Image (tube, rainbow, N blue to C red):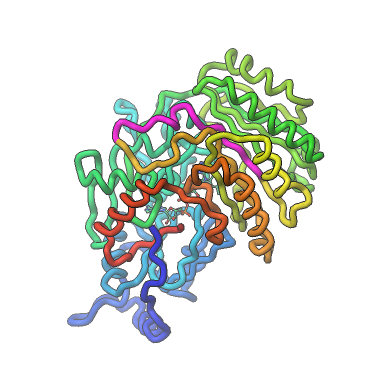
Amino acid sequence: MGTRGRERPGRHRRETIMKNAGTGPSAGRPPHRPAVRGPVLEPGAEGYDAGRSGFQTAVRHRPDLVVGATGAGDVQAAVEFAAARSWAVTVQATGHGAAVPAAGGLLIDTRRMAEVRVDPAGRTAWLAAGTRWAAVVREAARYGLAPLSGAAPGVGAVGYTLGGGIGLLARRYGYAADHVTGIDAVTADGRLRHLGPDGEPELFWALRGGGGGLAVVTGMRIRLMPVERIFGGGLYFAADEPAHAAELFRGYLDWTGGLPDRLTSSAALIPMPDVSGVPEPIRGRRVLHVRVAYDGGAVEGERLAAPLRALAPVLIDGLGEMSYADSGSIYTDPTEPHGYQGTNVMLSGLDEAGLSAALAATGPDAPVPCIVESRHLGGALSVAPEVPNAVAHRDARHNLRVISPLGPDGAAAARPVHRRFVAALGHLALGATPNFHYGAQEPAQLLATHDPATRTRLAAVKTAYDPAGVLRSRD
Ligand SMILES: Cc1cc2nc3c(=O)[nH]c(=O)nc-3n(C[C@H](O)[C@H](O)[C@H](O)COP(=O)(O)OP(=O)(O)OC[C@H]3O[C@@H](n4cnc5c(N)ncnc54)[C@H](O)[C@@H]3O)c2cc1C
């Protein structure tokens, strides 16, 4: 749902804004800044850099104004202000998914809108736009409940869910977007709308899996699952030799063939840095990290994990029973902001040729370090929810993705590698999932996040609700 190339305030306008900053609306003249409770920050102002920055440091937004929204009223005022001037509006929560850098226009920073309200009897939670999964997991756990959160507790729950959301228990319960029961969103005309199956159902359909750029979500209600304890964690295997890495990866994929839907897993080939803080057995080595979450009990979990443990000597065994509140430890994803780029492929299956070529393109000889991860899909992810949504490629069996942490000129080096990775899997590709497109990329690295019929329907929603293309998306 992209809206690039919009008219942006030029130098003269920016100077005017800065000159008038803080003066508020004047009688008979349009206001020079939106009337909001949160901060409004121009380039150079204290707090501007913090407001435009997020987890992904390789994509730098350079908006003309950052609005630190404190609630739906601020979002409305910001959108109205921008729309009246034909400025583009970009939204950022945590910046984990930033991909298209905003150059000019207005950036709505939702981080101040962080609030979770759990309804234990109804097994739901209301999340404000800037809430991170960590807060939702913590609040839900007080009632023995769990959200359909993913690998990293620092990710924004709303941005994740707009893109579908493949969580730790995804095969058991489906996409996070399948369990949204209501959404509040501000559309490009500045109206706050209450969306649900009976309230503007087409926009409600689109926002659940269609990605950003359609409306600014101010909050959403999600279902919580009765999950208190799981069997989960990670196993690390040595995978220094490319041939051994491929064999292990195949072993993991074979293991997934016979699993119940209650078990969701992934495996990642990771070149571990040789730095203190990384545990000694895996420091500086290429490893296969298999991640598991199972909500069928520890005894059965141990039985299911036995063939996995038998694949090769285990360097670190972190599998065991745990509280869902500790599930953020399963992936050990990085928590500090950094630059990265990556792409993904939703696969109908995985054959020997595709796997070998994808691993060869991203192996130790690649000019940039590559993490290659496979997520096991299927199960409830294949089943459309009762109230249909815009999540596509439900028949995918695996998602394979590549991610490279970026140094100063890393993007240029990563692009051809990631392009080869996608090309190797092309014959098995159904498309991609929006959430695993990381950082600014060229079109050749991006597969379609939605099938043609869904794309057409999403485009119609965009035209109906944002005909002038005020709201930007990351794709
Ligand atoms: C370390 C890491 C681990 C991850 N693990 C998983 C995982 O397990 N499963 C999974 O599915 N994904 C995962 N992701 C991907 C993640 O879900 C997406 O990148 C998601 O878009 C991040 O949302 P955010 O709000 O945190 O990021 P942001 O960059 O702030 O937002 C991402 C996108 O959503 C839009 N957006 C955010 N808030 C709103 C809003 N209120 N209204 C309208 N649009 C909005 C933004 O404009 C932007 O386009 C992971 C990403 C990282 C970096």
Outermost residue, bottom side: 12
Q: Residue at x 56, y 60 (%)?
A: 441
For residue 160, which quarter of the picture? top left
In the displayed structure, 154 sits above or below 137; it is below
Name the one closer to the observer, 412 or 329: 412
Q: Position of residue 175 (x, y in %)?
A: 43, 36
In the displayed structure, 79 sits above or below 350; it is below
Q: Position of residue 22 (x, y in %)?
A: 34, 76
In the displayed structure, 410 sits above or below 393; it is below
Q: Residue at x 57, y 34 (%)?
A: 349
For residue 307, which quarter of the picture? top right
Q: Residue at x 33, y 52 (%)?
A: 456
- On screen, residue 460 versus residue 377, left or right, reads left
Name the one closer to the observer, 222 or 412: 412
Q: Position of residue 25 (x, y in %)?
A: 25, 76
Name the one closer to the observer, 346 or 204: 346
Q: Is residue 379 magenta?
A: yes
- On screen, residue 135 versus residue 238, left or right, reads left
Q: Residue at x 30, y 31 (%)?
A: 386
Q: Is residue 334 magenta?
A: no
Q: Is residue 135 visible?
A: no
Q: Is residue 343 visible?
A: yes
Magenta region: 372-387
Name the one closer to the observer, 317 or 17: 317
